[in-house]
Image (spheres, grey):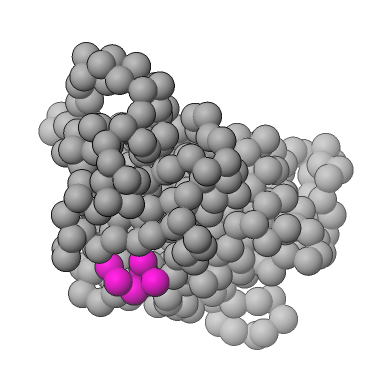
Amino acid sequence: MEAFGAVATAPWRVEYLRVVVPDPGDEDVVVRVTHSWISNGTEGSFIRGERIGGDTPRAASDPLPFPHISGYQKVGIVEKVGSKVSHVAPGDKVFATVSSVDGMFYSHAGHVSPAITHRSQVWKLPITVDPVAASGLVLTQVGYNVGTCGSINAGDLAVVIGDGMVGHWSAQTLKHRGASVLMLGRHNDRLSRFTCDEGDRVVNTNDTDAVDAVLAWAGGPGRVQLVADTVGSIPTLDLLMPTMRRFSHIVSAGFYGSTGFIDIQRMRNYEMSLHAPSGWTTERIDSTLALLEQGVLQTTHLITHRFPVSEAAAAFDLILQRNAPVLGVVLDWPSAESGEVR
């Protein structure tokens, strides 16, 4: 059957095109997408040709993964369900992860509508949750996943490297667990979106040395319980180790390509634990959605741009070229009732 998708046709190039998706089966849900949220880091990496799959960097001997439809998160309205689907019904507002597509390098797709999605990858949205707020739920769950790693007691100190979306949701989760959080970033606009309570701090590392800032905030070396790297900076992790406690935790959620080497022997000197969260699970999506409904996790204030999906090329160009401040980017899809041309 016919659908539409934001298709990466070549390195650094995205087009809004007609595509072919398989006919839905007994375990599938057909979702008419209303909003899809771009994962800047992961999708940008795939579109530049840096990855071949998941967290796997592309080697020179690997093919370029084009064409493909990037992404893994969107919301919409259920149009049809298979005979073995019982948890959602036509008319429900839902969140969906990856969907099926034909004729692409990968058989899974994010920014595609109608989205033929296996029942296991569809969640009914609570009526109190704004669908736009939930349209980046997988990425929000990555931040939740980072923030739930390691042992944290009330009053513990946690440093988040990165002021991107995962950094913000990691920091929000750590605060919910009782930690005081210092966010290291390079963008004043992004840093200003983090709500600092007593004990929290944001630091622009373009202006202030990261180690000096952490030591001043923590009151000396050996006091930080957890450092979460959401951008993929081994040098920063190395520099921050002396600020950390014995039996502390490093959480790595950045993409390092082929250079992700951590000195385990040095970690042993501190008896540190290393956590390497990745992907999503049903249980973590459930927990993230519950915290979103409760208002613990906040998302919409991180959206800086919204584009009609027909302008997907401009949306991805903004992310890839970085020629203007950008954080959360949402694609708005035409509704069946609007009469808009797809």
Quadrant assignment, res 277: top left
Q: Looking at the picture, how far across and down is residue 242, in whole percent?
A: 23, 32
- Asked if one can make out residue 121 in the rendered structure from this viewpoint, the answer is no
Work out which quarter of the rendered image holds the N terminus and state it: bottom right
Residue 139, x across and y down, in percent: 50, 51
Q: Residue at x 19, y 50 (%)?
A: 212
Magenta residues span 187-192
In the rendered image, the quadrant that contains the C terminus is bottom right
Q: Residue furthest left?
A: 60
Q: Quadrant of residue 284?
A: top right
The reply to whether residue 183 is visible in this rendering is: yes
Q: Is residue 326 magenta?
A: no
Q: At x 54% / y 58%, what residue is drawn?
A: 136
Q: Position of residue 149 (x, y in %)?
A: 50, 33
x 67%, y 66%: residue: 131
- Residue 63 placement, left or right of 192: left
Task: Please tell me which residue is depicted at 36% across the width and 55% down the height of the picture.
Answer: 183
Label the magenta part by its dominant secondary structure: helix
256 vs 165, left or right, is: left
Camera-nearest residue between 151 and 165: 151
Q: Is residue 313 above or below residue 215?
A: below
Q: Is residue 191 magenta?
A: yes
